[in-house]
Image: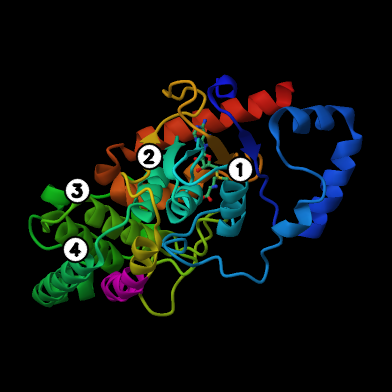
Amino acid sequence: MLGPLYNQFLIASLKFDIKHRQKLYERECQDEGHLQYLDNYCYMQPGVLPVLDFHDQNTSHSTHALHPFAAKFPPQLACWAIEQYSQPGETVCDPMAGSGTTLVEAWRLGRSGIGFDIDPLACLIAQAKSTPIEVGLLSEHNRRLVREIETASECFRMNIETGVFPDGWLEVDGRPELPNLDYWFTPQVQVGLTLLKRAIRAFETQPAVKRLWYVVVSSLILAKNSVANARDIVHSRHHHFRHEQIPDPIDRFCRRLRQVERQMRAYSEGGTVPRRGYADIHCNDSRNIPLAAGSVDLIVMSPPYCNALDYTRAHRFAVAWLADVLAITFNEYVIRGEAGLLARIREVIRK
Ligand SMILES: C[S@@+](CC[C@H](N)C(=O)[O-])C[C@H]1O[C@@H](n2cnc3c(N)ncnc32)[C@H](O)[C@@H]1O
């Protein structure tokens, strides 16, 4: 159980309409059950809520916009909580870290971060976003990777145009296990994504740099304007969508790298003491966290909306492509996610 392990337990609930939240809060406070819940678990005090209006603020600074993620914190919310309830040098934990907003903010504010998430794709994203990279090295390796991708795409131009895999590629790379793969990804996009993965895999660099590149690949798939034949996958159910022009994942990837370099520069150069270690992220169920009592000073988290968001469904297109990187098969991912969702729904119904 989490309770006894930590000095402070803050649940900062995520609601985008602050006025609605204020009303909700006031109403809930009149209800005995909710009052007790808030007293037990929250440090939210009446009067602080109006401060938490971030509508006109930039939520894409540092690495926050590296990858789309449903129901992300506005970074300002995590920042506010960390500054309010912890001191520089202390340790902040997010047991449902999602895309790592809390961990990015913890680093920026000189706190050590520990994160957990049950979803391996979320862990990969959180790790990529919260691990600073020396910008000179990143910039040089980005340039070299782009050169190698350009050379490969020149060699395999015909394959990319026709969508026919070059000899031997499928034996090495296999095809993603996603059902109806050809319906969701045109053959040309499949060849392009495979080429990107091969180029990244063959490149010798730090694990942090590779992670960042794989997350960029995932972001092309889960973006609002996805390279898949689907729209806004991460926030909704998959709706088939036919692009007027077949998307070019290679061109998009290379352009995204320039953006990512700027984001990583802002993040890596914006961190403050203690620069001891990066955020520590584990793929783990937060109901069973292996941490010693008292090892964390603050928890900042936003639990999933189990009746509204199905992360496994949202992420499965990217997981199918990155299964080897995530060390999970597509089927294991789906089965684990569906079992978890069913268990949570049963729990809610029981209550
Ligand atoms: C609302 S999201 C968190 C978003 C995060 N605050 C951010 O800014 O990106 C909730 C997260 O909880 C994770 N989750 C759900 N059940 C979990 C569990 N039992 N253990 C760990 N993580 C869990 C989901 O995978 C999801 O990434």
Where the N terminus falls, by quadrant? Answer: top right
- Real-space Cα separation, disc 2 to disc 1, in angstroms: 21 Å
Q: Is residue 242 above or below residue 99?
A: below
Q: Which residues are magenta?
A: 247-262
Q: Would you name the residue on which mark 3 appears?
A: 174
Q: Amino acid at mark 1?
A: Tyr
Measure how far apart labels 4 and 2 are at the Cα level: 29 Å
Q: Is-magenta flag for residue 259? A: yes
Looking at this view, is 64 or 4 the one in front? 4
> For the residue marked with disc 4, what is the amino acid?
Leu
* Residue holding disc 4: 195
Q: Secondary structure at mark 3?
A: loop
Q: Which residue sits at x=36%, y=73%?
A: 259
Label 2 or label 1, whichever comes before in sequence order: 1
> Which amino acid does the dot numbered 2 rest on?
Ile
Residue 296: image x %, image y %?
48, 31
State the colouring used for the structure image.
rainbow
Q: In the rendered image, which quarter is residue 251 located in?
A: bottom left
Given this view, does label 4 or label 3 mark the residue nearer the observer? Answer: 4
**Residue 294 location (% of width, % of height):** 49, 24
Q: Residue at x 47, y 40 (%)?
A: 90
Q: Which residue is mark 2?
A: 281
